[in-house]
Image (tube, rainbow, N blue to C red):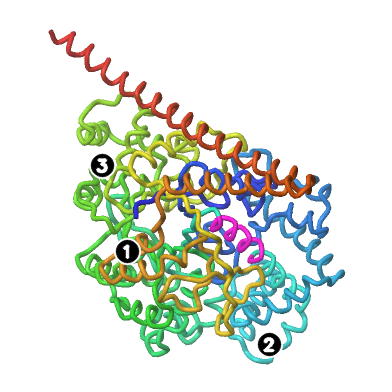
Amino acid sequence: MRASGVLLPVSSLSSKYGIGCFSKEAYQFVDFLKKNGQSYWQILPLGQTSYGDSPYQSFSTFAGNPYFISLEKLISKGLLRKKDCDACDFGSDPADVDYGKMYRVRYRLLKKAFQQFYDIKDAEFVKFLAFQEQEADWLLDYALFMALKDHFKGKSWVEWPDDIRLREPEALKNYEETLKDQILFYEYVQYEFFSQWEELKSYANKLGVQMIGDIPIYVALDSADAWAQPKLFQFDKDRRPVTVAGCPPDGFSATGQLWGNPLYDWEYHKKTGYAWWIRRVGACRRMYDVIRIDHFRGFDEYYSIPAKDQTAEFGKWEKGPGIELFHALNKALGELNIIVEDLGYITDSVRELVRAVGFPNMKVLEFAFDARDSSGPRDYLPYNYDKNCVVYTGTHDNETLRGWFDSIPKADYGMIERYLGHKVEDKDEMVAHVIRLAQASSANLCIIPMQDYLGLDNRARINEPSTLGKNWRWRLLPNQLTPQAGLLMKKLTKTYGRLPIVRTEAKVQPANKTADESSGRTAEKNVEEPSGRTAEKNVNEPAGRTAEKNENKNTEQNGGTAFDTANKHVQKDTAHAEDKKTIFEDMEKAAAQAVGKDFGKAASAAGKVIGQAAGAALEMVSDKVADAAAEFMFRKAAGKDSRKDSEKKAERK
């Protein structure tokens, strides 16, 4: 089924204390998506960021970012005082994340919360102990790694003393005892992170909004993964990287991109049956409804650069694990909802791997009209799409549409006008036209960055590859998500058949949790899942999902995509009829209670029914007003274009 969603990093929300997090603003954004017909919220990786603040360079592939813990929720639990949070300096610009100040004050507040949590040891402390046990396969290594980094003043593990750098048993034992309080703090932080994340995800799922997460293909060199499991990587005997990851020179970078991540020892992974990858993807599957895998082409071939090199100019392509890895994942985890990021330098063998795995790939409209990219028209113009793909105007690495129009050559802008079939001199209007191209395409899923719906320029850009210091900082302002901001979103989503169909079936009762599930996170909610899912997938699905199991299974057997499975719904008109029927039934019950002389209950029930009826009427009126306003905007834009054409014709005459 056709659907649409919005790309917005969690860090870009307008939360109160310096950075977007799992605060009330996150829930309000879910409400905004629901109100404006969106089915997906795509975010960037949630891992704990390191130097450079990139979510693609994390201290652990399993741990969450402590910055995303809502301080307001800790205040409401009595673990922090509001005046202590208000007194901290998180930066003066509400549209910017000041990571330097964030680092200095956020951890200080989290340590206060932990001390209070540890001192009172209420019923929630038992849940924390259960979390420690359930996540033990990564949690202790991560917490010890972070405690050691604090102990060694932030140095990378490759610079630690040899005894602990090489993980000698006696050294591990001594440091675990010496740093036990700091280790416990980092374990608590992860407990709080996952509790809050799962609460937010549950809320989104109940409203029919699914979360698209992101897996960076590589891990950071300075990470708990590289330190604790060196056999996974191409290290020498002294546990130093032999080769590192990056991209070769191209039209965007004369010397290529030197990422510096350690490369995987794929032969070792093969010998283990890809056990670490199964754990990793399984953990992400429990966190998200859909997983986007970054740099998917690295599974076919990866670019290998000697670790001593200062640029990416002299690397070479090496063979990756190919389809064998995905056979292992499917065998262990069952059906996977994955989006493959197959952007950049793409060969026929990469295209063949994408076809073989059957996952939807990505289409970016900014690449379709870029003269530097010779494959752009073939790969990214909408008339070349099949249904099994996801279309974007741009990604987190691209300029915003409005900023892009200011930077591209006139010839490229002319390409867009020729594709549209008319001139568009107003660049603000052109933003809406390009979003329309994406929404109108045959792609099953359309994801638009929030900045493009708001018409923001490059001051709202998330990341500019190969640069440092100015990335990952942009934030929404508190007043930017106005009803007007959703008009274009809802109108185009409705026009091109991407609105979710409203459900009215009874809610599905949670199924019992199985002992085999490795997550066990305390706030996780379990519901019955479509047939073929293993117990490892543990997400909150919209109510009524179980009624479509058999239909989903038949669809998948006949070539349906993951998005077909995720978006089967009943008809909207039927939903409105059912809502009216329910209201009338409630009114009859209220009348029956009045006849039975229970006037108190009757009055209460009648008031509730009237409120429901008023809410339903207001919703219908609101939708019609939004549609009319959006239609007026487009007619006005079209009128401008037609007037300009008429004036030009008159001039020619």
Q: Residue furthest front?
A: 595
Q: As shown in the figure, which amino acid type bears the numbered disc 2?
A: Ala
Q: Is residue 81 magenta?
A: no
- Location of residue 459 in the rendering, given as x and y in whole percent from the top left corner: 49, 37
Mark 2 crowd level (few <14, some 14–19, many ≥20, 10 Å Cα)? some
- Location of residue 305 in the rendering, given as x and y in whole percent from the top left corner: 36, 70
* Residue placed under numbered mark 3 in the picture: 369
Is residue 410 visible in this depiction of the protein? yes
Q: Secondary structure at mark 2?
A: helix
* Residue placed under numbered mark 1 in the picture: 561
Q: State the CA–CA distance, disc 1 to disc 2.
A: 51 Å
Q: As shown in the figure, which amino acid type bears the numbered disc 1?
A: Thr
From the viewer's perspective, tell me whether residue 315 is left or right of residue 198. Answer: left
Provide the residue span drawn in magenta. Answer: 194-206
**Earlier-in-chain disc, 1 versus 3:** 3
Q: As shown in the figure, which amino acid type bears the numbered disc 3?
A: Phe
Q: Secondary structure at mark 1?
A: loop
Q: Is 597 situated above or below 627?
A: below
**Which quadrant, please, contains the N terminus?**
bottom left
- Residue 552 position by quadrant: bottom left
Mark 3 crowd level (few <14, some 14–19, many ≥20, 10 Å Cα)? many
From the viewer's perspective, tell me whether residue 96 is left or right of residue 276. Answer: right
Residue 10: which disc? Answer: none
Q: Is 426 situated above or below 370?
A: above
Query: Is label 2 or label 3 in front?
Result: 3
**Earlier-in-chain disc, 2 versus 3:** 2
* Residue name at image x 47 percent, y 45 percent: 577
- Location of residue 413 in the rendering, given as x and y in whole percent from the top left corner: 27, 33
Proximity of marks 1 and 2: CB atoms separated by less than 8 Å: no
* Residue placed under numbered mark 2 in the picture: 171
* Residue name at image x 73 percent, y 86 percent: 174
